[in-house]
Image (tube, rainbow, N blue to C red):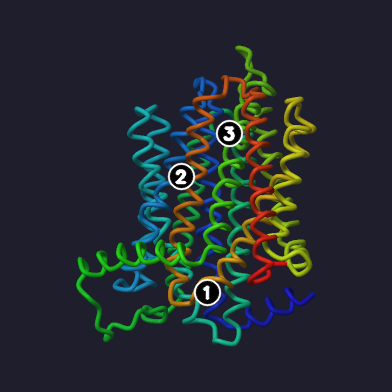
Amino acid sequence: MSVVRDLRVLLRLPDFRRLLSVRLLSQCADGVYQVALAAYVVFSPEKQTSPAEIASAMAVLLLPYSLVGPFAGVLLDRWNRRQVFLYGNVLRAALAACTALLIVGSAPDWIFYASALSVTAVNRFVLAGLSAALPRVVDTERLVVANSLSPTAGTLAATLGGGLAFGVRLLGPDSDAVVVLLGALLYLGSALAALRMGRDLLGPEPELRKPRLGAALASTAQGLRDGLRHLAVQRSAARALAAMTVLRFCFGALTVTVLMLCRYAWADTSARGDGADGLALLGLAAGISGAGFFAAALLTPWATARLGPYGWTVLCAASAAVLVPALWLPFSPVPVLAGAFFLGLATQGSKIATDTEVQSSVDDAYRGRIFSLYDVLFNVAFVGAAATAALVLPPDGRSAALVCATAALYAGVALALARWNRLARGGRCFT
């Protein structure tokens, strides 16, 4: 396979291997830590978790990406990137260890969330730094392949970390702190892996003149405004982003639904039940959804070559509009787990198609700013969905109204994109 061949070529580059090891350990730790937080917030036997508490947890995990992300690059262009990986991961290890102590000490929720928020905020700098450092360890000819394979490997590492956390968590109901400490150790391992690279290998070049920090931050804000103005002109990209935002909202609402079903409807919630069976089902749902993401990575290049980005997104959204009510409304484990696969495929397939459409229709000078806005929309939509679900869902997660409303949104996206696609045939052809 060409992917395997490309990976072998890249792995012959020692600096790429070292940078990749930092990414793999860091994102594996992310997977462990995020599952640990979810398990503690949702599945602790002493907690009667509500949809509102789940929405709060998701806000903690995702909003830092939206708030910090657009401005992270300004600081990364001023700080030594190798040192960002070293000190950032050491800081995250220390903060994760503090989170474990808060769990053991049954600290108030606001202190727990503040600790978790700090860990995820630092994560934005590490991930952005990994992307910024990649051209320093890979030549231009192989950069496109490295940009494709490196984040994919990181996502797989995060999935593996999540599976590892589920496995440790199932050993006992009081193992949340142990799982968090495992994440802390992996963060520390990522920091030590960064030491294998030269201090100045990853840049930035110290002699390059940089604007003052305040001016750079103001310039970033102005750049985001310029990106919005550019989207007003590039209607194709704006429509694709709007559609993806709605699809991400739907995915978030159904994710919270599955969480509540696993916690209450499908778990042993008797006095003697510790919720382990519900947690196992959640882990299975996450794994099946991940398989759908992987299937989307395989199918989307073939599908977009035949249908175009818009056409493939129409098919994904239309399929979800049909399958979501058919599989979710029984509120039974087997059909919902099957639906998790198709939902993962449709969501990731649409995202890949949206990425392609934005990359091809946006001017290169604006591409970075547009993707920063894309990142904000992507995460805010998910948190907004969790907040909406908190208002609508009953404690056991069984809400036919929410499922039907989600299906209607999927259908609306499919119809709108199909219409835009037909209109576009008079100008630039998407399919």
Image coordinates of residue 300 in percent, x first then y, are 73, 62
Quadrant of the rendered image containing residue 89:
bottom left
Comes first in the chain, label 3 or label 1: 1
Quadrant of the rendered image containing residue 396:
top right
Separation of residues labelled 3 and 1 (CA atoms): 37 Å
Q: What element carries label 2?
A: helix
Give 144 or 155, whichever is nearer the viewer: 144
Comes first in the chain, label 1 or label 2: 1
Q: Residue at the spot x=69%, y=67% of the render? A: 425
Q: Amino acid type of disc 2?
A: Leu
Q: How crowded is mark 1: few (under 14 residues within 10 Å), some or many (20 or more)?
A: some
Q: Residues within 10 Å of mark 3 (few under 14, many from 20)?
A: many
Tag 2 residue: 61
Q: What element carries label 1?
A: helix
Separation of residues labelled 1 and 2 (CA atoms): 27 Å
Image coordinates of residue 163 in percent, x first then y, are 64, 46
Q: Which of marks 3 and 2 is in front?
A: 3
Image coordinates of residue 326 in percent, x first then y, are 78, 33
Tag 3 residue: 256
Q: Residue at the spot x=44%, y=34% of the render? A: 56
Q: Residue 18 carries which label?
A: 1
